[in-house]
Image (tube, rainbow, N blue to C red):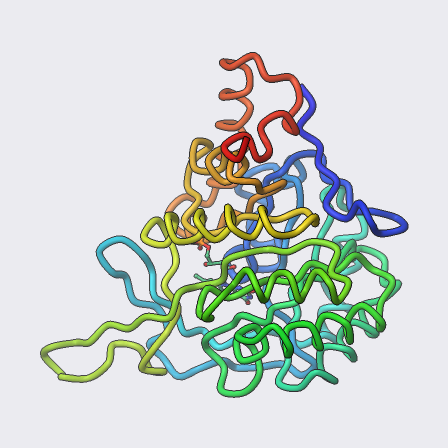
Amino acid sequence: MNLSVQLAPKHKSGLLLANPVMTAAGTFGYGTEYSHLFDIQKLGAIVCKGTTLEPRDGNPQPRLAETASGLLNSIGLQNIGVKALIKEKAPIWANWRVPVIVNIAGERIDDYAQLARELDGIAGISGIEVNISCPNIKAGGAEFGASPESAARVTAAVKSATSLPVLVKLTPNTDDIVKVAVAVAEAGADAISLINTVKGMAIDITTRRPLLGNKTGGLSGPAIKPIALAMVYEVAGAVELPVIGCGGITTGSDAIEFIMAGASAIQVGTASFANPRAPLDVLEGIEQFMQKEGVNNLTELIGAARR
Ligand SMILES: Cc1cc2nc3c(=O)[nH]c(=O)nc-3n(C[C@H](O)[C@H](O)[C@H](O)COP(=O)(O)O)c2cc1C
């Protein structure tokens, strides 16, 4: 069976994945944290924690709250900063078979461009995912992803600062995600990933206070899967670029739904917290489905529900 997917067909060196299963930023650390739990080299790609120019401590605790069908988080991009990532993580990744994509975030457009410049040409880094969709930081993040104009400006700035393939990750917290996707595609993105978390909150009725230190956060997990699926379906119908589906994917069947909606690849996020092997389980589930259905090439399934 052929599960390989090309995520950057318009890019000069491309971004070929052995299979469509990626990890979602912020839910799989730098990959190293999971490498003793299963063979992470079997995955299609690893997307690392959102990275900023300077290290960040993130938002005040508590930063995680479970709800009936999903997880609320307000981590606020706690990370080691790009310099430490280049010095400490990239040399490890350079020895891996699985490609690593660095998720970046900034407060200003220049921050994104500088991050892209610093990551360019570093061994062990195969691509950049531009996070214009983080709901948990005061400046930047999802602000850029909320309007087509600012999303396009960030995309163009990153594209002109790096020779790496550029994925742009969209937020569902916008009036019209299709318009944002089209603007990002026109600005030169190589692929589009969606969705980041959906804005949400929880209140502790005994203390009468918001549960999260940041008051609001982002909802992820099975609760958001139908929202993500509809958005992937709509975006895949509007752009020519590869679309990467993300949101509540827990099983192989979930992944197949996104692929049939038009996604060329998928990301597994919150599911890894309950089951650290979830990305591999999802991959095996896709393989079993293809075997059962007599599908030899994954590309036969991409967009099947659109035809
Ligand atoms: C704890 C946590 C941290 C996250 N950090 C990031 C991040 O740094 N950058 C990013 O683009 N998305 C981040 N996300 C969003 C996920 O990558 C993903 O888009 C979202 O959770 C939806 O997928 P899921 O339902 O499979 O988790 C984070 C999500 C969670 C739950």
Q: Nearer the viewer, residue 283 or 157?
A: 157
Where 168 sits versus 205, above or below? above
Image side of residue 96 versus residue 272, left or right: right
Image side of residue 216 versus residue 96, left or right: left
- Residue at the image point whose x is 34% and y is 66% from the top: 72
Image side of residue 174 versus residue 296, left or right: left
- Residue at the image point whose x is 44% and y is 44% from the top: 249
- Residue at the image point whose x is 82% and y is 59% from the top: 164
Total count of labels:
0
The quadrant holding residue 131 is: bottom right
The quadrant holding residue 170 is: bottom right
Q: Nearer the viewer, residue 233 or 113?
A: 233
Where 174 sits versus 61, above or below? above
Image side of residue 200 versus residue 152, left or right: left
Query: Which quarter of the image is occupied by the C terminus?
Result: top right
Where 190 sits versus 20, above or below? below
x and y, in percent, of residue 267 in the image? 54, 48
x and y, in percent, of residue 157 in the image? 78, 76
Query: Which quarter of the image is occupied by the N terminus?
Result: top right
Q: Nearer the viewer, residue 201 or 300?
A: 300
Q: Nearer the viewer, residue 203 or 165?
A: 165
x and y, in percent, of residue 230 in the image? 43, 49
- Residue at the image point whose x is 49% and y is 87% from the top: 138
Which residue is most to the left? 206
